[in-house]
Image: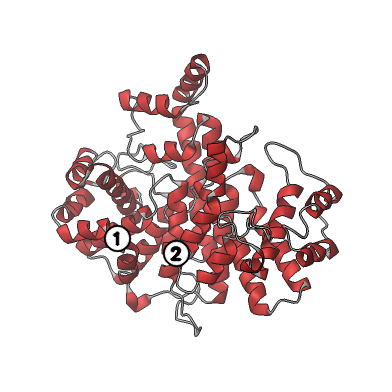
Amino acid sequence: MLLTETAPVASPTQLRMSDLISALSYALDLTEGQPMGHAVKCCLLSMRLANILQLPVQQKSDLYYATLLKDAGCSSNAARMYDILGGDERKAKQEIKSTDWTRVNFDGLEYLLRNVMPGRSRLERVFAIASVATNREAQTRELINLRCDRGAQIARKIGFSEAVTSPIYGLDEHWNGKGFPAGCKGPDIPLFSRIMNLCQTLEVFVTLNGVSDAFQVLRDRSGSWFDPELVRAAGELEEDQELWKILEQDRVRESVMEMEPLSISLYADEAKLDNVCEAFASVIDTKSPYTHSHSRAVTSVAVAISQRLALPEEQVTLVRRAALLHDIGKLSVPNNILDKRGKLTAAEWETVRLHPYYTQRILERIRGFQHLAFVASSHHERLDGSGYFRNLRNAQIPPASRAIAVADVYDALSSKRPYRGALSKSDVFRTMAADVPHALDADCFAALKSLDLTNGN
């Protein structure tokens, strides 16, 4: 449950938290290397299993949000995973969900061969694989602890209580005590953690190999990964043809929203909406050490520019929320590209150019967020049409997007990147001035220069 009052607050849109969180969960799917919709499908399975277990309504509500936010900490270990493996951490994360990484066996070796230092020399790979294999348990514990601890923090930042946050921390615990991060065993593992781990595994294997194979995986891991009683209860779902048809449709998210216990339905007032935006900005910024405060810094500057230009208050609010979420699509970009020290290849650059497209796709799912989605996803558009991903021009780019674009360029140039150091404020302004007024908005740039930017040199 939320720590704050959950009664609906009068507003034009009456935005439900289920609408907001379920849409943003698509960004978490991208970071985990899963197809968009993974978390909402897991939520649907969790709710069906909760019905079989006859959980009370409040527990269903807590499980509902815990499942949608189960991967909230997924960006926190992305850079570290890239450091260890030297490859696409999203691909490695995706395979972890379908590989029993608790065993040292042939499958584990194949996993390392696919994911450690791809593209490097054979000798480099041999040494790297040996190092990973030797330090497997310690590194796994480190990565999962980072992920689970951060995930619980994000849920707490949004305003959820321990009934939601604790199960997120225990997501990767196993019934036999060989899971992580705390090595909890049997009934000492929170019930919701046990349910979510089972349901996410079920969803992954249904997607990969079909329903029959997925339930065989549950039975094979009963007593090791999973609570045997939960495996038996989940078995009732195997012949539920209606359920598997829903999971195959494009309207899974709508079905999940309908499953929120309506008697205690949660609504996002202005303060809660801001909390969610700020929490997901933290998810975004944590993905790379080079962007650890980027979204918040861009927001601060974009809001100041908007206020200096005397935009209406509702527009300033729009700028603040859009700026916090403008890079949510960047969660789709693996760290071997984000943190690359050298020049990007054409294919890597195309991956980067697509991140505003994913920002649009994620945010437009939220009822009433269509304009915010457009503003946030236009931060790389330029007045002369040279930007991306839509190649908008002039009047097609709204004032809010122009302010965010200028703030985004300013912070990017002012911050250290893997391929260069941070530029001084004078060098930043000199570089930006070359793009004014044909690409960057002149009024926004003038407003930027008039600000007291104390972080500059």
Amino acid at the residue labelled 2: Ile
Front-lying residue, 374 or 213:
374
Q: Quadrant of residue 44?
A: bottom left
Identify the residue at image location x=51%, y=14%: 123
Residue 57 visible in image: yes
Identify the residue at image location x=56%, y=37%: 346
Q: In which quarter of the image is residue 18?
A: bottom left
- Dot 1 falls on a residue whose secondary structure is helix
Classed neighbour count for the residue bearing mark 1: other residues with Cα under 10 Å, few (<14), some (14–19), many (≥20): many
Residue 179 visible in image: no
Identify the residue at image location x=74%, y=63%: 441
Identify the residue position indicated by label 1 in the image.
44
**Horizontal side of residue 314 vs 328, given as left or right:** right
- Dot 2 falls on a residue whose secondary structure is helix
Q: Residue furthest bottom?
A: 10
**Horizontal side of residue 387 vs 64, given as left or right:** right
Front-lying residue, 80 or 140:
80
Identify the residue at image location x=53%, y=35%: 82
Amino acid at the residue labelled 1: Leu
Counting residues from the N terminus, which is met first, the one under dot 1 or under dot 2? 2
Classed neighbour count for the residue bearing mark 2: other residues with Cα under 10 Å, few (<14), some (14–19), many (≥20): some
Horizontal and vertical percent position of residue 19: 42, 69
Q: In this view, does 173 lie above or below 401?
A: above
Q: In which quarter of the image is residue 208?
A: top left
Q: In this view, does 232 lie above or below 60?
A: above
Residue contact between numbered discs 1 and 2, judged by CB atoms under 8 Å: no
**Horizontal side of residue 84 vs 443, given as left or right:** left
Q: In this view, does 50 lie above or below 219?
A: below
Quadrant occupied by the N terminus: bottom left
Distance from the alpha carbon under mark 1 to that under mark 2? 14 Å
Horizontal and vertical percent position of residue 299: 67, 62
Tell me the number on the disc at residue 21. 2
